Image: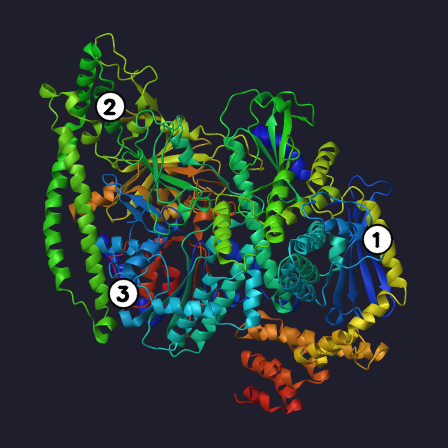
Amino acid sequence: MRLLRRILITLLCCAAAQAKVDRVVIIKVDGLPDSVLERYVAEHAGGARQGHSRLPWMEHVFHDNGVWMANFYARGLSLSSPSWSLLDTGRHLEIRGNAEYDRYTLRVYDYMNFFPFYWGYARDRRADMPGVELLDENHVPLLIDRFDRSQRYQSFQLYQRAVRWKTLENSLETAFKKSPRDLIDEWITGFEIGGALNHQTEDELIRKLADPRVHYLDYFTGDYDHVAHLTRDGAAQRAVIEHLDGLVGRIWAAIETSPLASTTLLVMVSDHGMNTSEDTYSQGYNLIDWFNSAEGGGHHVLTNRHPLTEFKIRGLDPFVSEVTSPSSQSFYLAGEAREYPTAVMDLDGNERASISLRNNTLNIIHILLDQLTRKKPAGRLRAAEIRALFATIDRVRPQWTRNVEELSREIAQLRARIEQQEALVAAQPKKFSEAQLQAGLAEQAKREVQRLDQMRLEERGYSDYIAAMQRLLSLDPADFDPGKFSAQQLIPQRSLGDANSPGDLQRYVAGPSAEGMVLAADGSLDMERSFRRIDYLSALSALRVRNNVQEGVSARPVDFIAVPLENAVWLWRSPERQARIEWRTNAAGDTELRYIPIAHLRQDDSGEVRYDRAGFGPGFPFDYFEDPNFNATPQWLADWHTERAWLNTVHRTKYSNGIIGIVEALRIVPASDAYLERKRELRRVDFIVFANNHWNFNVRGFNPGGNHGSFFRVSTHSVLLFAGGADTGIPRGLRVETPYDSLSFMPTILGLMGKIDASLPGKPIRELMAGGWQ
Amino acid sequence: MRSLFVLFLPIIALAGNPDFRVERLPIPGGSELITVFGPIAGAKGAAEAPLLSVLRDDLGEADPESSRLRYVWVLTSMPPGLMQRAVGSLPFFYWRADFGRNPDKRPSPVIDLGSPARPVWHSIAGALTQALALDPTGALIRTPTRSYRNNLEDQHRVRLLEGLAILSELEDDPEVKALLSEPELTEIETRLNLGARMLGGLLTTEKVPQAYVKERTRAEEMRGHNWELLRQRAEANGLYFEPFGVNGSATHALLWIAAADVNSRRKFDGQFLAISNPYQDSRLLNWKGYREVRDGREMIPLALYALEYPKVPLLLADLRNTYSPKRREMIRHAITDTAGGVLGISKFGNWPYLCGSTAFNFVRVRHGSTNDRNARLKAYAEVREWLALDDSLPPGLSHLLQQRLEMMGVNPMEQGVLHQADIARRQYAALVRYATDPEGLPARVEHDRNRELAAYRHGAGARFGFRMASIATLGLIDHREKETGQELEARLDRERRLASQTRFLEMVARSGPQAEIVWNMEEVRRAVDEIVALGIPQRSASLVARIMRETQDQETRAICARALESLEAPGAGGGFQE
């Protein structure tokens, strides 16, 4: 069936390919919601522009003479890094946040920080942005990789290959090479260096349009996203969109006079929407402070940026990727924030927080070791603590030993690869001829150096982890003398260990109990009374604020929490209002999903997950029951349906394609390589906390204007518009109401250009293909 | 805690526009005085008072293309009197000297929209005189002259910002909008704003809309940022946050504490709040001051903040520690006066001092210090004006805040708000007398028109020469265009229309390709027609040619072609070569 589907797609694309698209120009707009664009296109300008739209070029090019995709959605979390990766690759997510952390080594994958990339590029140690490096490692090509180097023009963006210093140099020149009059004006109103870079990029793109050898061009702008995060003011946001409208006009006019005018396709796409409202400020809730606090477990929290960056001198450090916020209320790790951060967070986008906590069993072992080595109990308590320590270790020993052994084997293979890579790097030329530079050999050499650096880094990090775990697992109760060890020798530092289970999150050990270690009647350690435990799902959903001065905004910052299960996702809103989203692959190779309302999910010590089936009603995650735009029966939810059926049914609801998105965000697709799969697994988070409407978890600064990251329709509803020259076959004045998500973007572009890749999981947009066919 | 929502929302909801009224007064010679009246809170006598007047010189025609806005008078305040100026030159005197003014004296405009750059040149000339002539004479001269100049400049800024605060209140008023178009309001607002900044008056007219959007965006960003910062700090410290402000938006905020919480022991982190720990504070435990019962809970106000301040909310009034904000302000002024006045250390003549003070200020601002004197002044002026104009706060609280803000005044040349209504009425009466006197405002308008015509006819170099000649001969040689009366009006009408249409066509040409997609081509054709009718000057030819190139609209192209033919200008070649 899968084969048949691929053949059909290929035929459809071939049909489309009869129409001719030789060149694609993509305007990439970060964070632009379709609803905002539609609103301003529909709005009429006054004065000397009477009778015209506020966005006349958008109206002319895309609305009247192109295709407007009215229901295009970000798939997965509505965040820049994952969303652009999906658009740029057409593959399922490898990158699931703006920052990800390796559980074993706490290595930060900081996809948004371009300073280390530029610095590394200048020092010949990096060739690509961090996201591209990861995609390359996982053998996932970008859209631009489908074109020869000489055929493409890529602007500055998240998934960028190489740096064009000349563009930066020229933009600086553009910024200051002005008449004194203009310079004074700019001095008065404020200089905009970013504007100069945009201007320079536009100039270069327009010049490149005159070159018929160039088949791929893109222009990235993050201006709207930036402004909309900072201000809810409609006029300020509109000014950015009007500027974008002018850009569309200039590019379109340049296309019309270019040699490939009739076969050029112009596309405008945004990666996600933006939850912004002129009446409401987005309110922040500081989860770092909460996790630092005693109620939150007294964690030392690792993030990728400084909280309140603008108020710190060290906030000026452009290379920062790891920041630990120490807790002053830690129950057993006071003063050890550097060695033992126990919570890591990716808060970007801000309507959600992806959180991982240190392995719960590792906490228990650490606390017991700490008690034995520092508190030095005597008599029965000492014996009970030692028994409890080894009982705890024995419970996880088989699994942890297996993990360590497998990882050791993988690291041995990695060492062999490092040797090969060292030879490869040594063989790279130190100087390159002009022809070699044009062929990209210099960049390839940088890429090899970067790979070697990364392999060495991983080898060191994982080896340290293996060594510490081997020391811990080799402890023998027969000759265990707490006086000979310290917890620091046995517990891997800067590591979270293995992932937590749902049960761990419900009974998470944050420290010894207030009364300390307690003996049970039978002389064993009372494991319930000896530890301070937190049910994170209940505690987070119970958060409330007193200062809630906006009408329509809840006093609860947390909407619901998502936890990955085996082939399922568990959504928690309250003990009685939970859901289990399950997935499977059908005979045709398509993913099928179902939504089961449940209550009281719990996991016992054996790992078995139990829950009660709940009757369907209001208040369950995604609010399907009470949503007027949900037009199916409750039973429909509990039945298996393809993603297409789900998208058709739920895309207009409050949480749009959230059910597909949450699965995309948390599902790990098996990799061909065990080491790659392990790394993928190690980047997976313990749980994701979703913010209520008009709430955000930004701590870096303040984003009162708006935010994204959740599955609210306003945050996922993105822009996708097409317009083409006379021979492209792109329909004119077509509005497509059928919903699509970002997985369809790449196959559509490739299909229209006749570069069909049937291995892509997404389906091309039929309406465009049909138009092309005609 | 929905309770807080219930507690504070009614106040926010009430914060709407007070009732404003607009009056037009025709001025002999074809111009009009537009005056906005509004209620001033606490005013004795009549409920309303004149707030702001604008002179529109429309050459006697109701055509926006030939009309120009000129002067803006902020009637609620006036320039300092002689005595105040004298006190203002006393170094280290940081108290208001509210005497020696004559409200019946003809009011002086805060800005001339026809010549916004003039104050900048005056200011530069003043600064040069200070630096080159007065500073080297020693501390005895340097200190008072610097104090005088600083106080005078601050006082002028406050007046501009008061005008701005009034305008902010008027933005959405339908009656105001009927008399002043959106571009006109934008121009006044932007010019007042820029007038309060160094070199702000030099901004070219074409950039005014852009500057407005930038400034608005900046202000909105600051407001939202500080709203969030203060809300989160209030939350973290167990306090209650209440935003309120100009025109229903959140420009200011109050922090409250529940009386029942005062006695509790909890940690307090005063960072960004600039107030002391309210918990266990004996002043609050024995509080006799203002309090309110809301939702059954007794609340005590702690502090008032301005939210439109860069990076952090600015503490304007500390209701427990009345003199604390003033003390801080006085210390800041004293440091400036000591360094610049007594010691004569200038940043620009002393590199170590420049580097040291820049680094120190950078670190302080980075940590949230409120070092921006202009921004503090703006916040202060804005809140005073808002409290005077808006009645959405309970009268008792409003009066209390006004009292505290009155104490904040550190400029001897400044005037209090408590007599605003009386001053405004008398200033307006004086303005009306001036406007109806043929030798008063009408004569000034005539003089300005003559200058404007000269500006159209002569280049910047020639005008500079005329000005120098006038200064050198103490006004004996004063260049005047020969036209007067109706002839002057007719000439000016032509020039203004030409300039207006040219500016419009430049905007069309700048806006990019295919003008017909963006613009109403009837308007474009009308502009080209009018330029032709007025006699297309050589300098417009290339512009018309460019419009012709940029459009595919046949009718417009034909009109452009006719226009260029009528000129037979070689510069129009571009238009014919297609």
Q: Is residue A472 above or below residue A523?
A: below
Quick one: A640 or A422, which is closer to the camera? Answer: A422
Where is mark 3, residue-wise? A146
**Which residue lies at the image location 86% right of the left edge and 63% below the top edge?**
B26
Amino acid, disc 1: Gln
Image position of A15 (left or right of A480): right
Which of the numbered marks, if any, corresponds to residue B427?
A: 1
Image point (46%, 53%), residue name: A225
Residue A703 appearing in the image: no
Chain letter of the residue carrying label 2: A
Q: Residues within 10 Å of mark 2 (few under 14, many from 20)?
A: some
Residue B233 percent location from the top left of the image: 52, 35
Residue type at mark 2? Asp
Residue A370 image label: 2
Chain ID of residue with mark 3: A
Indicate which disc, 2 or 3, sits on the residue closer to the N terminus. 3
Residue B122 vs B367, above or below: the answer is below
Can marks 2 and 1 be said to lie on one chain?
no
For the residues labelled 3 and 1, the Cα–Cα distance comes to: 74 Å
